[in-house]
Image: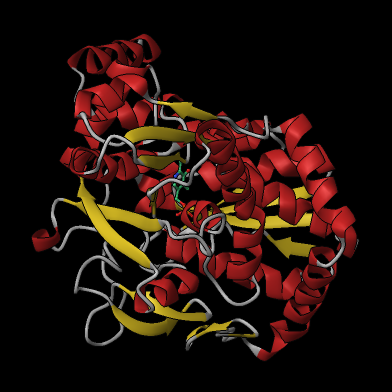
């Protein structure tokens, strides 16, 4: 099945010659760490003292009663430091950077969440940090830029191309080629050239390992289905890895945006709109036109708004191990609203995609069944985007008043 970064033809590492040695070094240090039991111990230890691990599973009793079907459990990745599962990946890579003796990290970021997580890790470990972000995203996501700068990172505004995430990725690679001696590129999801998909999934597998144990301890049986939202695929890979060898149905939920028929979505594995191609150093399904130009994607959740997807998930789709669905922006806002009111949980807009599908299926399952939803992050930190998505008039008035205060 898996041959040095290939998953039945997906994945690989399509690299410029100059980066080959750096990737070899990374793969070597990762393989050594993976085979060293001390390393996982060190990782789990820092995650428990710095980031609230193990995160609990919460029984959503009110939602279970409301849908009158399977018992709904929620894995609480929102309780991580910086508010999402992204902490697992950046702290893991940070430990590898220390092992390689490097002193500087760089990252790309779209919404800014991965940038904040990386800058946090850099502050903790004492690394220099540069974050590449498209000009359009810098304007849209200023609160995250504010925090990255407070954390000591240099935020570089990318004005090339369409000035969004993919342009930031290109700039980060350019930096890496020039500075690979002392610099590590902290890729933010289970995508990109080998060994990133495997390495990021490995660190995120802490989610699934914990969740499997926690559900068995509480219920003495496995969940029937596990749901996770899919942007690049790291939180989904993380929770799915705990259940891959079990008779558990795994469901990945992508951004359906304005609907699959609208063309304005980021559904790569749940629509017929994507095709296999090679870009950004790896082979997977991309939303591209007939000339291989990347299409514009859309989602209410910035973290799911991406043209490619993990090659490991592409493989798990082809082999029918994971089922893929899409949730529209509107369904997402409704599911998020309901979850907040019924349980007092505030999932991120990204995570709410997984809730949409779980809510559709819970009533069709028997009451003895358990379903598990990965709450990949918390929504309260993204008040600007969430308030927009909810179209809250009082929030708008507040922003208007604030602007007037500054203008006065
Ligand atoms: C970034 C992000 C995602 C999407 O990334 P994956 O790699 O697909 O997990 C999902 N949920 C939250 C809360 C995020 O911040």
From the viewer's perspective, is 260 left or right of 388?
Answer: left
From the viewer's perspective, is 128 left or right of 175?
Answer: right
Q: Is residue 83 above or below residue 245?
A: above
Does the image show residue 68?
Answer: yes
Scheme of image coloration = secondary structure
Question: Looking at the image, which residue is at 18% across and 16% down?
Answer: 393
Q: Which of the image's four quarters has the C terminus? A: top left
For residue 286, what is the image quadrant?
bottom left
Q: Is residue 336 above or below residue 289?
A: above
From the viewer's perspective, is 23 left or right of 348?
Answer: right
Does the image show residue 153?
Answer: no
Q: Position of residue 378 (x, y in %)?
A: 46, 30
Between 350 and 243, the one lying in front of the other is: 243
Q: Is residue 263 above or below residue 131?
A: below
Question: Looking at the image, which residue is at 28% across and 30% down?
Answer: 336
Question: Looking at the image, which residue is at 77% across and 81% down?
Answer: 24
For residue 62, what is the image quadrant?
top left
Question: Looking at the image, which residue is at 32% across and 38% down?
Answer: 352
Between 99 and 298, the one lying in front of the other is: 99
Q: Position of residue 358 (x, y in %)?
A: 28, 42
Q: Position of residue 142 (x, y in %)?
A: 46, 35
For residue 401, what is the image quadrant?
top left
């Amino acid at each position: 099945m898996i041959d040095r970064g290939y998953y039945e033809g997906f994945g690989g590492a399509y690299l410029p010659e100059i980066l080959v040695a750096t990737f070899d070094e990374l793969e070597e240090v990762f393989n050594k760490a993976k085979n060293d039991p001390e390393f996982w111990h060190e990782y789990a230890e820092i995650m428990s003292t710095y980031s609230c691990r193990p995160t609990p599973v919460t029984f959503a009793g009110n939602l279970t009663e409301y849908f009158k079907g399977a018992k709904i459990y929620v894995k609480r990745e929102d309780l991580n430091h910086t508010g999402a599962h992204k902490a697992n990946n950046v702290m893991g890579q940070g430990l590898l950077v220390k092992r390689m003796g490097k002193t500087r990290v760089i990252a790309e970021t779209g919404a800014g969440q991965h940038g904040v997580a990386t800058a946090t890790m850099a502050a903790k470990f004492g690394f220099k940090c540069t974050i590449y972000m498209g000009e359009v995203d810098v304007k849209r996501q200023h609160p995250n830029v504010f925090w990255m700068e407070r954390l000591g990172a240099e935020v570089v505004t990318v004005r090339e191309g369409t000035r969004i995430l993919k342009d930031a990725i290109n700039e980060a690679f350019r930096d890496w080629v020039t500075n690979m001696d002392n610099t590590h590129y902290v890729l933010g999801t289970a995508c990109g050239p080998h060994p990133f998909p495997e390495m990021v999934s490995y660190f995120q597998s802490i989610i699934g390992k914990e969740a499997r144990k926690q559900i068995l301890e509480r219920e003495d049986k496995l969940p029937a289905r596990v749901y996770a939202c899919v942007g690049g695929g790291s939180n989904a890979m993380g929770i799915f890895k705990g259940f891959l060898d079990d008779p558990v149905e795994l469901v990945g939920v992508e951004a359906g945006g304005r609907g699959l028929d609208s063309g304005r979505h980021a559904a790569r594995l749940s629509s017929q709109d994507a095709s296999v191609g090679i870009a950004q150093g790896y082979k997977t399904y991309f939303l591209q036109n007939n000339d291989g130009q990347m299409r514009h994607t859309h989602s209410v959740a910035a973290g799911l708004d991406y043209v490619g997807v993990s090659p490991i998930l592409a493989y798990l789709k082809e082999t029918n191990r994971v089922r893929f669905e899409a949730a529209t922006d509107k369904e997402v806002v409704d599911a998020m609203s309901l979850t907040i009111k019924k349980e007092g949980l505030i999932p991120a807009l990204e995570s709410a995609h997984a809730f949409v599908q779980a809510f559709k299926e819970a009533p069709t399952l028997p009451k003895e069944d358990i379903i598990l939803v990965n709450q990949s992050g918390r929504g309260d930190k993204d008040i600007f985007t969430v308030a927009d998505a909810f179209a809250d008039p009082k929030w708008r008035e507040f922003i208007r008043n604030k602007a007037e205060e500054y203008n006065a």
